[in-house]
Every structure is written in C-alpha cells, then in structure tokens.
Image (tube, rainbow, N blue to C red):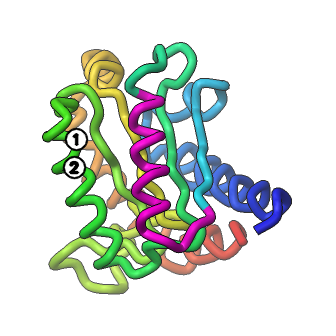
Amino acid sequence: MSSTAISLSEQHVRAWLESFVVGLNLCPFARPVVASDALRITVCESDELQQVAETFMAELELIRQSPESEIATSLLVLTNALNDFEEYLSFIENAEALIEEMDLAGIIQLASFHPDYQFSGEPAESASHFTNRSPYPVIHFLREEMMERVLEDFPEPESIPLRNIKTLEEIGRAEIEKRWNSLK
C-alpha cells in the first residue's frame, strides 16, 4: 500500500471513532483521548501473521515504555490481516496470554474490534455487534491505571455495555448501516 492508502486507512478509523465511538458515546471516556495527540494509531499493512505479531509486540513495548502523556492509548489497525473473525479471536486470545506471560496483566489490557464482530449467542442481525465493529480488525491497547482513574468518577460503569446496546437498538439497524456505509 502507498502512504496515501495508509492515510486513507487511518481516516476510516478516525471517522469510525468520531461517528460511532464518540458520536454515539459508546465509550464515555473516549472524547478527550480521540481529540488529543496522546491517541496513537498504527497501521500494519502486512497480511503475514509473523509481521502482525512483530508489530503487535513493538506496539506493546512502546506503550509499556512511554508515559501516558505521550501515548494514552494505542490502536493497532490491521488492513490486510486477520480478516477472518475466528482467526482474529484466536490471535487476541494468544495476545492476551502473552500479556499474562510478560507480567503485564493489570497494566495493559486489550480491547478488540473487527468488521465482522459478533457476540456469541446473539442473533446475527443484532445491533449489539456494532459496539465492537470497526472498519478493519483493530487491537486497542489500554492502560489499566488510566481506566481505573476514569472509572472512579463514573457512576455505574458496569451499565455501559447495556446502555450501548440500548442506544444502538433505539437508533435501529437501518441508521447504523447508513452510518457504517458512510465510513467508506
């Protein structure tokens, strides 16, 4: 891919962040980070799992070593790899095991987003899947300490997932798909 294509990939991700994550308030803590320079977006163009794994490790090491003021959170965007949702979930499972092995549990956690994200047991047409859908497979590196701070002042944080599902269901599948298609 050319640098223009990388730029376009990042534009798609930023449009998704603005339209879905911030625009629908799916993450009530995202607005300040998305608007800041402390949000890092790394695009990996490779379709080779070895290169994806190396990029994942580099990103993990970078966020681990960087102060929060420089990198609050990071999104690893995979434009050509892990397009199969089951393969993506397997990669995430291995990545989480690696975080445990590296004694980073409690320090870094991962959130997962995928164009075909589907919660187990939910009907395929459920609006709930869009809480974790993104234009490309995305691995979100979160600092647990930062999350603990923002959650301290948030009433009933455990209600966020149900509130998000309700929001999406109220908007309706047609409007969600209209927003989704406008990202491309």
The residue at the far right in this view is: 4
The foreground one among 71 and 17 is 71
Query: Image height check: is 55 above or below 37?
Result: below
Crowding at dot 2, Cα within 10 Å, few <14 / some 14-19 / many 20+, comes out as some
Residue at x 21%, y 47% (from the top left corner) = 98
Q: Secondary structure at mark 1?
A: helix
Magenta stretch containing residue 56, yes or no? yes
The foreground one among 20 and 83 is 83
Residue at x 63%, y 55% (from the top left corner) = 13
Q: Is residue 150 left or right of residue 130?
A: left
Magenta stretch containing residue 100, yes or no? no
Amino acid type, mark 1: Ile
Residue at x 44%, y 52% (from the top left corner) = 54
Residue 122, by quadrant, is bottom left
Q: Which residues are magenta?
A: 45-63
Residue 96 numbered mark, or none = 2
Contact between marks 1 and 2 (CB within 8 A): the answer is yes
- Work out how far the residue at label 1 is from the one at label 2, CA to CA, in angstroms: 5 Å
Residue 36, by quadrant, is top right
State the image coordinates of residue 154 (x, y, percent, origin top left): 30, 23
Q: Is residue 152 left or right of residue 77?
A: left
The foreground one among 61 and 153 is 61
Residue 99 numbered mark, or none = 1
Location of the N terminus by quadrant is bottom right
Asked if residue 97 shows in the view, the reply is yes
Residue 56 numbered mark, or none = none
Amino acid type, mark 2: Glu
The foreground one among 116 and 28 is 116
